[in-house]
Amino acid sequence: MGPDRLAATSGLVAALAALALAIAPAAGAAFEPGAESAHDPIYPQVGNGGYDVLHYAIELDYDPASNRLGAGTRTTITARATQDLSRFSLDFQRELELDSVTVDGVPAARAARRDARPRLSRDPAVTQPAKLTVTPAAGIERGASFTVAVAYRGRPEPIVDPDGSSEGWLRACSAPGDCDGSYTVNEPIGAQSWFPCNNHPSDKASFELATTAPSAYTAIGAGARVSRVDNGDGTATTTWREDAPMAPYLATGTVGRFDVETGAMTDRTGGATIATFTAIDSAGAPARKEEARRAAGRIPALVNFLSRRLGPYPFGTVGVVADWVPSVGYVLENQTKPHFPGTRKGPYVGSSTLAHELAHQWMGDSISPARWSAIWFNEGWATLMEVTLDHAEGARQTPRRYFRTVYRSAPRRWRIAPARLDGDPRQLFNSFVVYNRPGAMLQGLRMILGNDRFRALARDLADRYAGGNIDRPGFLAATKRASGLRGRKLRRLGDYVRQWLLWERRPRLTPADF
């Protein structure tokens, strides 16, 4: 090699080396594990740090007869790293067997599950949340998008909460031994019983759910149905997609035999056309199914009742699932499709409760709590809207009388602050603390601000926080903006909200002080 060619080659090598340095991570880059908690004061066992989930693509191969997820079940998560990651964790229970874990198509260097920390309860009947810890073959740089695909199979087990209720992937049984599929309700942490996730409401993402099940069955997901493909082997694959950001606890994977009706309605506040979907358990007696169908038929009127008070409906679809699973005992506001478990007599949808769950589509679903101690926001608004509807339809209790009734409740009922819950997950659904006290606080605000400003507050919240999360300071700031108050009265308004949410005794301030 002559000296000129050697010089040229040396120059090329130097240029390539400089380019490699420019695009490679800095020498000694500090790749570190992501946090294994969202540091929630009520549920520190769930949530993870180091990344933000952008999208879930869930593929379920479900056999209703055995209540098992078969080979081919997979969840693919698209996320963005928020730090230089050496490893990260997902919330995922141990009952489901792992087949493979890949990151950007490459098998993970290590994937292991263990119980989350700390212990959730000393009661052995309570389910301990679990973590799936994933070490990728190479570190993931901050700001980089990546995909993690988890293939798994097995029989999902319900999660038992500290208050004794069950959630997650529940077998749909109208009576012991008479089961026809799944009934999926996840609040607060049940999602990890059937798919790996960052299981905290602060990390919302879009969802796609493709469920393969026997052709005679209906598979349901959040959002809009994209397709249903007959596989030619006695099964069909149904795909649903929800593009609006959704917290994992609001997802659903319900599968069963349903009478299904679809249609459309108009949101008279926003002018949008909204697709409607009603699914009623086929096994119910004709009279029970007709009663549920009539209640579901009120959805357009209820949505418009609520949109006049809360702003345009936040999603492109709305509906209800009326199943027959009486052992569940509660209704849940699954995004776009509230789920009703029915009673011993069959499927059932109550109009007042339906209004409550539809109100959650604005307050709780579109706007989700930043942490579980902010669940008062979800339930306070939904409770007040339920009271408001009942009075509009002839109930003797006015919203003002409701406020007075709550305020006169026994002193012992005021000992737990809604925005703290004593850090106790057993209080998460305390009817007075989480539902009635915040509902009365909001009615008090309506009395202080007047109807017009109160509706302006609701719409400001719905616009400002749509698709996101809210906490107490954010709510207080919005309330002050909407109030029109100044000086001492504005400070008093702040004291009013703080007393109703943070005091462990009866608040001193009421609307009469304004």
Image (cartoon, helix red, strand yellow):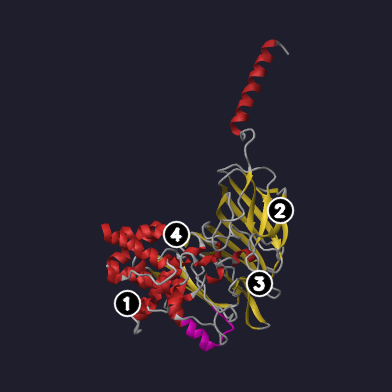
Q: Can you identify the residue that label 4 sits on?
A: 471
Q: Position of residue 327 (x, y in %)?
A: 60, 80
Q: Assess whether residue 434 is covered by the magenta stretch.
A: no
* Among numbered discs 3 and 2, the one appearing first in the sequence: 2
Residue 123: which numbered mark, if any? 3
Give the magenta part as a residue range. Answer: 280-293
Instruction: State if disc 2 and disc 3 touch (CB < 8 Å).
Output: no
Q: Is residue 264 visible?
A: no
Disc 2 and disc 4 in contact, CB within 8 angstroms:
no
Q: Label 2: how many residues lie within 10 Å, few (<14), some (14-19) or many (20+)?
A: some
Residue that numbered label 2 is attached to: 111
Q: Which residue is mark 1?
A: 400
Q: State the SS at label 4.
A: loop
Residue 235, image x and y in percent?
66, 69
Between marks 2 and 4 in the image, the one whose residue lies nearer the viewer:
4
Mark 4 to mark 3 CA distance (whole Å): 31 Å
